[in-house]
Image: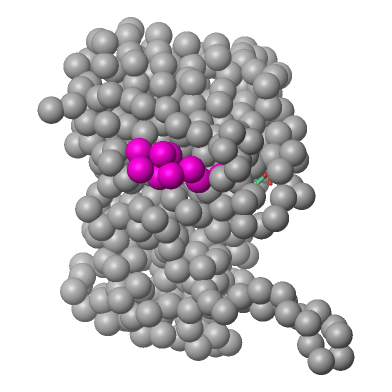
Amino acid sequence: MSKKIAVLPGDGIGVEIVDQAVKVLECLKKDFGLNVEMEHALVGGSAYDDSGSPLPEATLNLAKEADAVLLGAVGGYKWESLDIAVRPEKGLLGLRSELELFANLRPAILYPQLAHASTLKEEVVSGLDIMIVRELTGGIYFGQPRGIRTLENNEKQGFNTLIYKESEVERIAHVAFETAMKRDKRLCSIDKANVLECTELWREVMIRVAQQYPEVELSHMYVDNAAMQLVRAPKQFDVMVTNNMFGDILSDCAAMLTGSIGMLPSASMDKNQKGMYEPIHGSAPDIAGQDMANPLATILSVAMMLRYSLGAEELAVKIENAVDTVLNQNLRTADIYTEGDVKVGTSAMGDAVVSALKA
Ligand code: NAD
């Protein structure tokens, strides 16, 4: 039976990069027997413009009934002044929470061909291969109460709540330990247990769950030190697990180690391996519509989709090899271009990956 992919390009470069990922999927369907059907829907600012909601019911229903979701990115200057309740980002957060996508896997892998594109010294980053496991549906981004209130003296006060139940920490801990088991079996849990009670509990639960994974070496690090270590000696890490907000920040930091935010895919999973797959970058309104965006993070997100949600490991590896091939051909979008490379646009890069798949 064919599997269904909900395709949600979103806004800005989301549309251009998802087009390239769809080309890759079409090629896998036609030439390699991948049995999937794709259905497109609006999300984010484009959905707001169309219906007044960044996450229309039809989009949510499609995402719920699909086996996997492919997302581009949401947001842009045009919608920045909207009320927070209908901003494009609400569409994304809504999908994550409605689909209960609590586990975000963000690999930060440095392609040897791009070692010189990192802002860090080549010897610090070459061979880098980290997996960041970020809790995605809890913590301060969702905690209640939240808001901006006016105090008795008329001063305004903003407040948010950092909150985690044991069960929420436990389930992300299991994902992280399972991930470590498939890699180098080293897991570093990032918290701020010296200051925040919520993360003191986080650490306690991590230690408890570790007893079920005796082969995995568990360590702990405060988030401020983790940020420093990521730029000082990133190769010390294998798998990192952390809460929603710390993971948001650390994974962007890790992304830059690899040279470009345009290279990194991500997967957000529920407890049944259903997932939403998206590049880690945003909608890049500064370069939208100019055929400049790097589509490789989105194409690599399709590889993760095949691996984690569609049970097609072989095809996932095929995509990763095709990306390797185009990098070996020195094809580069502007974000990873250095002198001597062949500069290509978004669409040409997508075509090159398809050609490499067919070769
Ligand atoms: P961004 O990731 O969109 O862009 C940051 C910088 O990286 C920009 O200079 C951009 O040109 C560049 N960049 C990003 N992706 C690229 C690619 N594939 N190829 C080449 N260059 C790329 O982050 P931002 O500028 O902070 O945010 C822009 C909008 O995106 C905002 O509305 C923000 O809310 C939204 N956003 C959405 C998501 C998401 O949909 N998951 C994530 C982050 C930000």
- Give the residue drawn at x 67%, y 36%: 284
Where residue 76 appears, as percent x and y from the top left, is 69, 40
Asked if residue 308 is positioned above or below residue 83 in the image, the reply reads: above
Asked if residue 243 is positioned above or below residue 309 in the image, the reply reads: below
Where residue 147 appears, as percent x and y from the top left, is 66, 74
Q: Residue furthest left?
A: 1
- Give the residue drawn at x 49%, y 17%: 350
- Give the residue drawn at x 38%, y 19%: 24
Read off the magenta span: 54-63
Give whichever of 342, 305 is nearer the camera: 305
Q: Is residue 261 visible?
A: no
Classify residue 345 by image quadrant: top right
Classify residue 47 by image quadrant: top right
Q: Residue furthest bottom?
A: 152
Asked if residue 62 lies in the magenta stretch, the reply is yes
- Give the residue drawn at x 68%, y 27%: 288
Specify the quadrant that holds the N terminus.
Answer: top left
Asked if residue 240 lies in the magenta stretch, the reply is no
Specify the quadrant that holds the C terminus.
Answer: top left
Where residue 91 appears, as percent x and y from the top left, is 53, 48
